């Protein structure tokens, strides 16, 4: 898979190193404690980070830490802190995340309020943990865009990049309603300045689609797939043509990303170059000389 991914210009993130929910922890690990468990968790971090160093841009180091605390119960309150420290030492270039559900989806889950998430992240930061990002899973039934916006605004106070890491819409709804609500979530996430990326949770299991899929088993678009294609086309700067003013200037507005520019003067003079349009409040100026 990791040969296929870069060959098709796909970037991968690692999910996850530790899942705190005992239901998803192997039985042999659940039977360990003390030094034996520490040995096992250190072996896991080192083996993963060594084998896949520089291949994943992100790692979800601790998954669903607000809801579950298997490792902290067995190893003490500082276990998560040590996980992050060890992961950073093993791969200093990877962006390290906590990942959690029911933060942007609802305000009725007492275990994962936005204030609780902020408090947990600040606690880890104060203890010296090296953390780079906030992961929000985004498993929605009926989304609440104003709540979602308010949560993202609050999390912005941490000055960390935010990713929507597992966005899907419940299969308790029709495919048409899934598509409608997916568009609301994607537009809200894409428009927020602190959201650096969005990943969809379009997982399959042996019996078919887990919750939300973009295509059927013949790779024909479902309504959710139509929404994604529509938004990708909308959020893309297409070819822009124009003529410079008397000062030799030409302006355009575009989405963040990589651009290729070609300038022509008369019949024989042409210059080409590339530039990157990144975040920032100021207008970017790029010069090209004929």
Image (tube, rainbow, N blue to C red):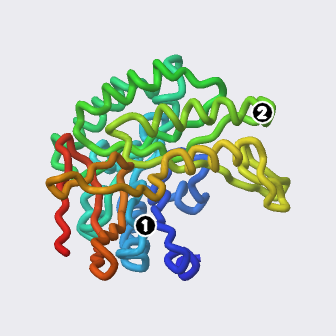
Q: Bin the neighbour count of mark 1 within 10 Å (Cα to Cα): few under 14, some 14-19, many 20 and up.
A: few
Q: Is residue 109 visible?
A: no
The residue located at (42%, 55%) in the rendering is: 240
Q: Is residue 180 above or below residue 125?
A: above
Badge 1 is on which residue? 40
Helix, strand, or loop for circle 1? helix
Q: Can residue 251 be seen in this view?
A: yes
Q: In this view, does 219 lie above or below 117?
A: below
Quadrant of residue 127 in the image? top left
Badge 2 is on which residue? 176
Image position, residue 290 (x, y; %): 19, 75
The residue located at (46%, 20%) in the rendering is: 147
The residue located at (75%, 42%) in the rendering is: 223
Disc 1 versus disc 2: distance between alpha carbons?
46 Å
Give residue 144's mark: none
Q: In which quarter of the image is the N terminus?
A: bottom right
Q: Residue furthest front?
A: 266
The residue located at (32%, 48%) in the rendering is: 252
Image position, residue 61 (x, y; %): 39, 55
Whichever of labels 1 and 2 marks the residue nearer the N terminus, that label is 1
User: Toward the viewer: 187 or 204?
Assistant: 187
Mark 1 or 2, which is nearer the eye? 2
Q: Bin the neighbour count of mark 2 within 10 Å (Cα to Cα): few under 14, some 14-19, many 20 and up.
A: few
Q: Would residue 98 be found to the left or right of residue 164 on screen?
A: left
Q: Is residue 194 above or below residue 157?
A: below
Helix, strand, or loop for circle 2? helix
Image position, residue 54 (x, y; %): 35, 75
Image position, residue 260 (x, y; %): 36, 68
């Amino acid at each position: 898979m990791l040969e296929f991914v870069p060959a098709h210009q796909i970037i991968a993130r690692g999910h996850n190193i530790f899942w705190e929910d005992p239901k998803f922890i192997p039985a042999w690990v659940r039977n360990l404690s003390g030094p034996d468990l520490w040995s096992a968790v250190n072996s896991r971090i080192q083996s993963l980070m060594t084998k896949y160093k520089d291949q994943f841009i992100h790692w979800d180091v601790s998954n669903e830490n607000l809801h579950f605390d298997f490792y902290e119960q067995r190893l003490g309150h500082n276990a998560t802190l040590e996980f992050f420290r060890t992961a950073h030492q093993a791969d200093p270039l990877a962006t390290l995340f906590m990942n959690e559900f029911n933060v942007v989806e609802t305000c009725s889950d007492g275990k994962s309020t936005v204030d609780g998430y902020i408090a947990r992240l600040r606690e880890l930061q104060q203890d010296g943990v090296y953390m780079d990002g906030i992961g929000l899973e985004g498993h929605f039934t009926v989304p609440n865009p104003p709540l979602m916006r308010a949560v993202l605004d609050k999390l912005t106070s941490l000055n960390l990049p935010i990713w929507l890491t597992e966005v899907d819409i419940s299969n308790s709804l029709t495919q048409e309603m899934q598509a409608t609500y997916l568009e609301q979530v994607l537009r809200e996430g894409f428009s927020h300045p602190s959201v650096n990326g969005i990943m969809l949770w379009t997982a399959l299991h042996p019996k078919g689609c887990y919750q939300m899929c973009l295509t059927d088993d013949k790779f024909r678009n479902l309504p959710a797939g139509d929404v994604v294609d529509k938004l990708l086309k909308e959020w893309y700067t297409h070819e822009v043509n124009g003529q410079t003013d008397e000062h030799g200037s030409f302006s355009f507005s575009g989405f963040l990303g990589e651009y290729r520019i070609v300038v022509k003067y008369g019949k024989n003079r042409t210059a080409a170059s590339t530039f990157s349009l990144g975040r920032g409040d100021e207008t970017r100026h790029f010069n090209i000389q004929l």
